[in-house]
Image (cartoon, rainbow, N blue to C red):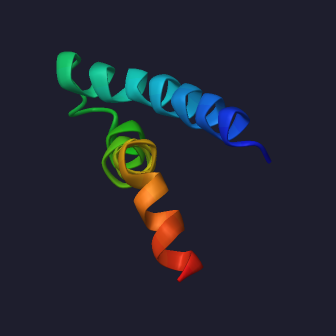
Amino acid sequence: MKLSTERIILRWVHILLSFPIVGYIYEPVADRSYEAFATKFVYIPIVVLSGLWMWKGQVIRQWFRR
C-alpha cells in the first residue's frame, strides 16, 4: 500500500470515529450503556492509535526496519 493511501485511510478512520466521542461528551449517556462502553473501550483507543500513527508513523517504520 502506498503511504499516501495509508494516510488517507487513517485520516478518515480518525475523523469518522471521532463523531461518537463528541456525542459521548455532549449527550447524556447514562441510559445508553452499550454506546458508552463502545465509545470508551473501542472508539477512543482506535482514534488515539490512528492519531499517533499519523503523527509518528514514520519514526516507528524506521525503528522496525532496523
User: Where 21 sits versus 2, above or below?
Assistant: above
Q: Residue reaching furthest top?
A: 26
Which residue is depicted at the point 41% across and 21% down? Answer: 19
Which residue is depicted at the point 56% across and 33% down? Answer: 13
User: Where 53 sits versus 8, above or below?
Assistant: below
- Closer to us: 38 or 34: 38
Q: How many marks?
A: 0
- x, y (%) of residue 26? 19, 16
- Closer to us: 32 or 41: 41
Q: Quadrant of residue 43?
A: top left
- x, y (%) of residue 62? 50, 68
Which residue is depicted at the point 53% across and 77% down? Answer: 64
In the image, is 51 to the left or to the right of 25?
Answer: right
In the image, is 61 to the left or to the right of 49?
Answer: right
Q: Residue reaching furthest bottom?
A: 66
Which residue is depicted at the point 21% across and 34% down? Answer: 30
- x, y (%) of residue 60? 45, 65
- x, y (%) of residue 8? 63, 28
- Closer to us: 16 or 37: 16
In the image, is 11 to the left or to the right of 55?
Answer: right
Q: Quadrant of residue 7?
A: top right
User: Where 54 sits versus 15, above or below?
Assistant: below
User: Where 14 sits versus 36, above or below?
Assistant: above
